[in-house]
Amino acid sequence: MTNYSDHISEEVLQNWFSSKTLADPQLRYFMATNDLPRIKPTFKDISNRLFGCDNPYHSYKPELLPGPMQYTAHIGQKTLEAIQHALGRKPSFGVEVGSFIGNSATVIGTWMRETQGTLMCVDPWCGDINMWLLGNFASTMRKVDGNPQIFSYFMNAMYNNGLTETVVPFRVTSVVAARTLKVLNYDIDFVYLDSAHECGETFLELSLYYDLIPEGSVIFGDDYKMFPAVKHDLDLFCKVKGVQLTFTGDGETWLIQKPAASAAAVTEVAALVPELA
């Protein structure tokens, strides 16, 4: 039986769970020849960088689709208030990882639009295991040709809710997005992690996006009890990082605020030396 610990060092693990990419020559050249200052990006900043235009919705034509399945956002006013309380201000740039048909993006985007904030929505819009195998998702996936239509539902939702200058869709995997954001050096206020909820994948995403956010920013999500993988990976992550898990009061929605480096160091030492805990 293979003993992974004989071959995978702590240094290797640290690199895997970091948002920093091991850049190839093309990417190294891009990083060396572009000025990438630490900024809170605007909608226009992101659109120009990723799409080469001021607004990706300008060429979008809403599609006539049957109504999507009933799918209620898991976050509400209590979560928004918890984010603002933790930050001490209203956020100006946040990232949602896992957006499906856009219900939660509509809630967060509408909130951020009030102060001209920007929300980036990361999702390949291909669906998870349940969406491919369970019949109750079929009318929204509409995948008879192998191409799920959930991205069209998401885009329609942003268009119909007046969020075409607030919400930026970034149609890539969570790993690609995290490492792209690291290269771009964006200053992120929060990350809403609501993706595939797979064991190991959830821990990786928690690690990547926690590494990506600055001290004082927050990462939050839901489905703590509904999805065993989420609870398993989230509990493990909190133990590994020595961080506190809190709940916002909106169902199973949880929140972690990244502590200052000094506080994190004290927590780490206390964990290693029981008598200091």
Image: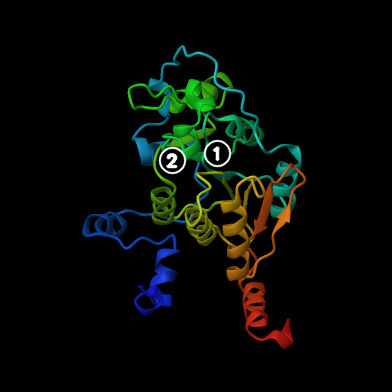
Mark on residue 172? none
**Is any atom of residue 164 visible in this view?**
no
Which residue is more in the foreground, 30 or 229? 229
Residue 46 drawn at (x, y percent): 43, 40
Compared with 59, 166 (above or below) is below
Q: Which corner quadrant holds the C terminus?
A: bottom right
Mark 1 lies on residue: 118
Q: CA separation, marks 2 and 1?
A: 9 Å
> In this picture, is 242 found above or below 250?
below
* Label of residue 46 in the image: 2
**Front-lying residue, 11 or 94:** 11
Is 74 situated left or right of 197 in this image?
A: right
Residue 254 coordinates in the image, percent (x, y): 68, 51
**Callout 1: SS:** strand
- Residue 156: x and y, percent? 50, 21
Q: Quadrant of the N terminus?
A: bottom left
The picture places residue 155, in percent across and down from the top left corner, at 48, 25
Which residue occupies the foreground of this view, 16 or 61? 16
Q: Secondary structure at mark 2?
A: helix
Look at the image and tell me whether residue 121 can be seen: yes
Left or right position of 14 against 191: left
